Amino acid sequence: MSRTTCILLSSFVLAGLAAPLQAQDAQRAEVADAARSLQPKVVAWRRDIHQHPELGNRETRTAALVAEHLRELGLEPQTGIATTGVTALLKGGRPGPRIALRADMDALPVTEATGLPFASKATTTFRGETVGVMHACGHDAHTSVLMGVAEALVAMRDELPGEVLFIFQPAEEGPPDGEKGGAEEMLAQGIFDDFRPEAVFGLHVFSTLNAGQLGVRSGPTMAASDRFNIVVKGRQTHGSRPWGGVDPIVAAADIIGTAQTVVSRRQDISRLPVVLSFGAIKGGVRFNIIPDQVELVGTIRSFDEDMRQAVFADLANVAEKVAAAHGATVEAKVPDTEGTPVTANDPALTARMRPSLEKVAGTGNLIDMPLNMGAEDFSYYAREVPAVFFFVGATPAGQDPATAPSNHSPEFFLDESALDVGLRAMLQLSLDYLHGEG
């Protein structure tokens, strides 16, 4: 499918042509009505946010847009939480449960290559380099959908049972080096202290599903993510006489190769998957100088805490022993920071809310998701209260999701009918839970 065709498909949504018609009869009438009236606003918000992306802890424009919208709805937003986070509490006109709904706002250091008329041209400095900035993971969609959900629920306030906390979170992709941020910091600054929800819901647009599809999984859903940093220290010498020093490049290469056995030979991956990947190698400045040191950085993904800790220990051991065999030493930080825990959906809550998602997606369009090696800091909320984190198809119908540009790609493309589906799904979940259904 051509990019032009994809854009045309998205524009059809504004006329209501891409709505999931087969699911209409099963949805709450107020969900269908709200989605239909709000869709033009949600699309406009998404395109505006997409054109003006901001990195984690720098979402000042986005946060201001969100806060102003919440004020216009008659809510009292709290701003500046975890640097740029925004929350607002809606109290319904009738007693009932308490829930929280979360959207993330940050973009990525990616130069956009979609060719969209509202593509980002923004640049910024990231780790000392000038980079493009793009909503390559769809957080612009998440923010605009939750803005729409807030407006819909406020319109129902008088008859709404219970209370809803709207969470617009910065830095899901991680805060800048040396800063705190994201879900963990939102919680550390007390967003659940005075308002303890019974359940929390979140969504993520995803390229591996087609527009119109929803996906969910009970239990562990997205992996724990940990970074590591290994500095291999040798002794500098001329490239023509390597025996005059200790070559950290060769030692580092040996560490990288041997580290592949940490998972393949020491972990039972028939039980649960584990990934160990090197992401960057830095060392040396000139073709004929063997440097003093080489830095290796990478990521570990896992679903089981025992396996996670075993990989930490094995990788540190490999680094130390292999370096020693070359006469080098290492400083191994495995992990180098506190990582993101496993995102796990509460089994009982997931079972209860699956029918709500199926009402929106329609028969055959609610997908049982496989384990996902990606990570999400929604996991911090899910550790506090029962949670359901679900996926919304982003790839245009008719295009193979397996070959579509993935989340984080400079060509990541969102079929805007996903905004309609996401809005309906979050509204249906919220209303069914608040009314004690599901």
Image (cartoon, rainbow, N blue to C red):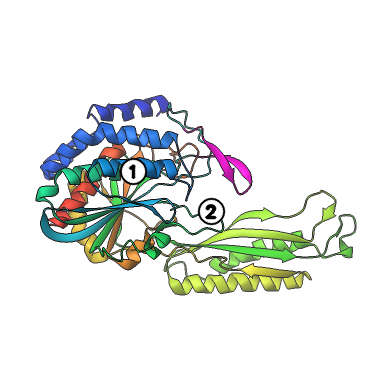
Reading the image, the residue beneath label 1 is: 66
Picture residue at 34% right of the left edge, 43% below the top: 66
Image height of 233 relative to 402, above or below: below
Residue 47 found in image quarter: top left
Picture residue at 40% right of the left edge, 24% below the top: 4
Image height of 233 relative to 3, above or below: below
Residue 89 found in image quarter: bottom left
- Left/right placement of residue 389 relative to residue 288 reads left
Reading the image, the residue beneath label 2 is: 176
Marks counted in the figure total 2
Residue 98 found in image quarter: bottom left
Picture residue at 22% right of the left edge, 55% below the top: 164
- Left/right placement of residue 397 relative to residue 149 reads right
Mark 2 or mark 1: whose residue is earlier in sequence: 1
Residue 64 in sight: yes
* Amino acid of disc 2: Pro
Of residues 403 and 319, which is closer to you in this image? Answer: 319
Q: Residues within 10 Å of mark 1 (few under 14, many from 20)?
A: many
Residue stretch rendered in magenta on the structure: 120-133
Q: Quadrant of the C terminus?
A: bottom left
Q: Is residue 406 magenta?
A: no
Of residues 215 and 31, which is closer to you in this image? Answer: 31
Point out residue 361 in the picture as x, y percentages from the top left corner. Answer: 22, 44
